[in-house]
Every structure is written in C-alpha cells, then in structure tokens.
Amino acid sequence: MEYTQLIAQAVVSGLLKAGIYSLVAIGMALSLGVVKILNLAHGDFIMLAQYLSIFIFAQMGLDPLIAAPIVFIIFAIFGFGIFKGLIRFAIKTTELNQLLLTFGLSIFLQNTILMMIGADPKTIFVSYRNVSLSFLGTEFGFGRLIAFLIALIILFALFYILKNTKFGKCTRAVSQNIEGAYLIGIEAERIQMVAFGLSIAIAALGGSMLSIILSAHPTIGLEFTIKSLAIVVVAGFGNIYGVIWASAVLGILESMVSTLLPGGTGLSGGVFFLLIFVFLIMAPIIRKR
C-alpha cells in the first residue's frame, strides 16, 4: 500500500473513530459544563451499557442499535438516581471530594461487574460486524460506519435541543451562571439533574454503539474516561460544541500513529496522554497572547 494511501486510510479510520469518541465525550463535557463535576466514573457507564446491550442481544435477540433507546432510558433513570443520591451533595463540597466520590463509584462499578460476570471479555456477533466496505481505495467496517452515522445524528439532535428549546436555554443559563439562573426563576438543581442523567444516557448510547465493534470487559471504561477527558481538555472544559473537532483531531492522530509508525498500535494509546500534557502547558501561553 502506497504511503499516500496509508495516510488516507488513517484519516478515514480516524474520522470513523471520532464519531464514537464525540458521542462518548459529549456526556463528560455536559457534566462538566452544567453540573460542574468531573465524573471519573464516566467510562464505567459506557462499560455497563456495553454489558447491558450484550445481555439484551443474548436474551432477546435485539440488535444493539435497535435496543439503544431502551439502554438510553434505563441509564437516564440511573443517572437521575445517582445525581439525587450522590452528586447533588458532592457538588456542594470541594473538588477533591468530588473526584474521590466519582473515583470510588468507578471502582465500585468495575468490581461489581468483575464479581457478577467475571473478567473474560464478552462479545456479540451481529451479521454486519465483519462486513467491510471500500471507498476511494480505503477500507472500513460497516459496523463502524453505522455507529459513526448514528453518533452524528444523536450529536446534532443534542445540539439542536441545547440551542433551540426552553430546556436548552435553561441549561446554557445554568452553565454560564448558576446564581443568576436561580435569580431569574430557573430551577437550577433540576436542570443539573436532567443534564447529569442525559450525560450518563448519552454515554450509554456510546456503549451500545461500541458493543458491536469492541468486546466488553470490566476495565474498558477507564480507557474511555481518559479519552473523554483528553477530548474535553482539547475542546475546552464544558465546551460542548468543541467536542466534535477535538474528537476528529484525536481520532485522526491516533490512527496516524497506529498506521504509520512501527509498533504504532501499542503507541497510539499514548496520543491522548500526550495531547492532555501539551494542551495544559500551551493553553496558558496562548491565553496570555
């Protein structure tokens, strides 16, 4: 394969990854922007959604894409309950307490799955999982394309809701100034609860999409927590609209490293750590200018 074709393949693969990464990271951005909490258990809800999608497929025969609305509703309710029982108290304390709480929740969820299901990866084989498509000399999986397109539809629907609905306007008001939102009669805590539940539910949709292309195991959530954090850092904390381009940058860079460098598959995971490091150093310098 020629070098230019390798680059084209890496770009296409990176863009397809970016759709899923956007869907996964948008929930963390929403949680940070509206609820003002960094949820270190974010990826573990993705992991739980993978397992639930696999369970529904095994017991009912429902394709994860068809079962996605069921998963969304279950995790939205789950998110509301976690906010009511834990998060609404944590956001009134220090950032350290918030991090410790969500980190503890992450460990609890991982170990619960480990005890109940075990450490062996769980995989489902839908009819289109191994189907490949070709476009201008590049190849990609049909499952990844479907997941990418559904992710884009969900993201643009969310952007429309945030920009054009009463709930979206209230959400932006709470994100910008929670005290001011209270003063003009917005029930800020209810908005935060809905936003947190929505962040968990959207992450769960990402888990449903991932279940058709990746195996589920108890620690896979950590990987996506780190990737989501890297995307949010690059996009800007709480910047929901910047998540798409940040996901594209990270997805393409990850694919470039994996495709073009010797032993790149093992090195590609470090791209996210490197970009967090670079952006945290460069952001203050850029702001001063």
Image (spheres, rainbow, N blue to C red):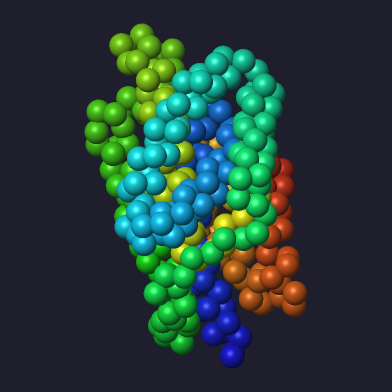
Between 94 and 247, the residue placed more toward the observer is: 94
Where residue 213 appears, x then y in whole percent? Answer: 50, 66
Q: Is residue 17 left or right of residue 73?
A: right
Task: Residue 72: name its quadrant.
Answer: top left
Q: Residue at x 49, y 65 (%)?
A: 124
Residue 237 visible? The answer is: yes
Where residue 83 appears, x then y in whole percent? Answer: 48, 25
Q: Is residue 48 above or below residue 259?
A: above
Which quarter of the figure is the C terminus placed in?
top right
Which residue is the extreme one toward the top?
Answer: 183
Task: Residue 128: name its quadrant.
Answer: bottom left
Task: Residue 158: name its quadrant.
Answer: top left
Between 55 and 151, the residue placed more toward the observer is: 55
Where residue 21 appears, x then y in whole percent? Answer: 51, 55
Which residue is the extreme one toward the bottom?
Answer: 1
Between 213 and 15, the residue placed more toward the observer is: 213
Residue 240 visible? The answer is: no
Which quarter of the figure is the N terminus placed in?
bottom right
Where residue 151 appears, x then y in whole percent? Answer: 39, 56
Q: Residue at x 62, y 32 (%)?
A: 105
Q: Is residue 215 above or below residue 29?
A: below
Q: Is residue 92 left or right of residue 157?
A: right
Q: Residue at x 24, y 33 (%)?
A: 165
Between 19 and 75, the residue placed more toward the observer is: 75
Q: Is residue 220 above or below residue 143?
A: above
Count of picture labels: 0
